[in-house]
Image (cartoon, rainbow, N blue to C red):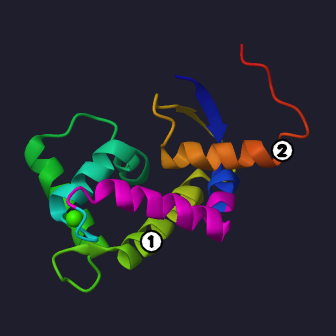
Amino acid sequence: MGVVIIDGTTVKNFVSDEAQFKKSVDERFAALDLNNDGVLSRSELRKAFELMRLIETHFGLDVATTPDELTQLYDSIFDKFDYDHSGTVDLEEFREEMKKIMLAIAEGLGSSPIQMVLEDDGRGFLQQAADLEASKTSSVSHPTPT
Ligand SMILES: [Ca+2]
């Protein structure tokens, strides 16, 4: 586990690199589609958000929330994703909404960088954003971790 510093620009660059972003989103979608039916169910999407920890960043939940409140929250998120109210989220809907969420996060961050603790698996979305930036500036210099 480590720590990276990201700001709105980092996240925005990640989203605007369309090929890379799509690849990340598609990979994520495939990993979340547990029964491989090509769409995400309510429980699959909920799992996604629990894994990505985007709830905390996007919705500002940093305090303990009751299970009831969480279920309500996840339901409202699902309805946002499920644009055509088909009861499932398809890849297109997932891509669209992830993009919106990431841009909203970028907006929220603005130019004030935040410190982010990296997950062990290294697959977090914001982490990928940070990695992308690191790879682009890698010819310059890497700050030495203290
Ligand atoms: Ca599914």
| Residue 92 drawn at (x, y percent) | 40, 78
Seen in the image, is 107 located left or right of residue 97? right
The image quadrant of residue 106 is bottom right
Of marks 2 and 1, which one's residue comes earlier in the chain? 1
- Report the front residue among 19 and 75: 19
Amino acid type assigned to the residue bearing label 1 in the image:
Arg
**Quick check: can you spot residue 112?**
no
Looking at the rendering, the quadrant in which ligand 1 lies is bottom left
Q: Circle 2 is placed at which residue position?
A: 137
Q: Secondary structure at mark 2?
A: loop
- Category of crowding for the residue at label 1, using alpha-carbon neighbours closer than 10 angstroms: few (below 14), some (14–19), many (at least 20): some
Residue at the farthest top position: 146
The range drawn in magenta is 13-35
Residue sitting at x 52%, y 58%: 24
Residue sitting at x 57%, y 24%: 2
Residue sitting at x 82%, y 29%: 142
| Residue 128 drawn at (x, y percent) | 58, 47
- Category of crowding for the residue at label 2, using alpha-carbon neighbours closer than 10 angstroms: few (below 14), some (14–19), many (at least 20): few
| Residue 6 drawn at (x, y percent) | 64, 42
Residue 95, which numbered label? 1
Query: Is residue 51 magenta-colored?
Result: no
The image quadrant of residue 115 is top right
Amino acid type assigned to the residue bearing label 2 in the image:
Thr
